[in-house]
Image (cartoon, grey):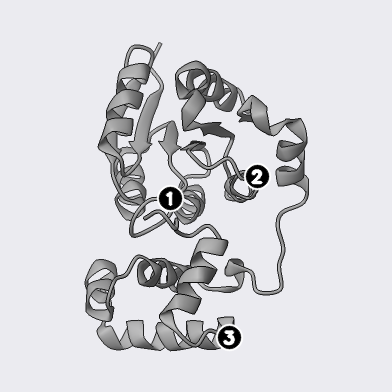
Amino acid sequence: MRQVRILLGDDHSLILEGVRRLLECHYDVVGSVADGKALVNAVLRLAPDLVVLDVHMPILNGIDAAREIKRALPGTKLVFLSMHSNAIYVRKAFDAGASAYVLKSGASEELLIAIEAARKGESYVSPGFGREVVDSARNFPEKSKRSVMELTSRQRQILQLIAEGKQNKEIADILSVSVKTVEFHRSRLMEKLGAHTVADLTRFAIHEGLTSPLE
């Protein structure tokens, strides 16, 4: 029987190495990447059965990466492995197509269980959250007056990169667009979100889970 093919996405090398060691005895770990954009590209290239990914990754966060993966390859299973225990991230992950959400603190005991649940078409979250979190995530997707989902995919990418401290030229290079395009989207972001400064945009990006205040 063919081994399940798994791709890993996390920007912490020690986490990647630990997860790889945990999984490679049971599955075919086909690769690992450190940012969300590279993760989407790797999924398109390798077509894994399942992806283990973090919520917060550079360039493209895990939630938006998950949406792109699901649009391109709907059958790919997604298992989030995160340090964030706030239920908002669970809700966003499931809304993006996740099958499981595991806290990094419990990865050694829970990740294999979560992967097997995902393979069977079931849902799994770390026990500390409670079943009601999953039910809420599936049945009541988060809505807000100024939701990040009112932004286009490109605007969310640019918002994240601005919050990560990237300048217009850097953003243009990363996304392979012109500086004028970045400037246009930055202006539209300010208008849509009622922001006046980069700090305002950064606060919104953190609130919406696009990036972490620790990064």
Amino acid type for the residue under numbered disc 1? His
Name the image quarter holding the N terminus: top left
Q: CA distance from mark 2 to mark 1?
A: 15 Å
Q: How many marks?
A: 3
Instruction: Note whether 196 is above or below 116 in the view shown.
Output: below
Dot 2: element:
helix
Amino acid type for the residue under numbered disc 2? Ala
- Mark 2 or 1, nearer chain start: 1
Amino acid type for the residue under numbered disc 3? Gly
Residue position for label 2: 87
Q: Residue at x 43, y 71 (%)?
A: 159
Say which mark, if any, is on residue 194: 3
Residue position for label 1: 56
Residue 154 shown left or right of residue 175 in the figure = right
Residue 98 lies, in percent from the top left, at 57, 40
Residue 9 lies, in percent from the top left, at 35, 40
Residue 203 lies, in percent from the top left, at 51, 69
Find residue 34 and report its image quarter: top left
Instruction: Note whether 202 is above or below 6 in the view shown.
Output: below
- Mark 1 or 3, nearer chain start: 1
Residue 138 shown left or right of residue 193 in the figure = right
Residue 202 lies, in percent from the top left, at 46, 71
Q: CA distance from mark 1 to mark 3?
A: 24 Å
Q: CA distance from mark 3 to mark 2?
A: 26 Å
Q: Residues within 10 Å of mark 3 (few under 14, many from 20)?
A: few
Is residue 122 at all visible to an observer of this figure? no
In-front residue for pair 136/163: 163
- Mark 3 or 2, nearer chain start: 2
Q: Residue at x 61, y 43 (%)?
A: 90
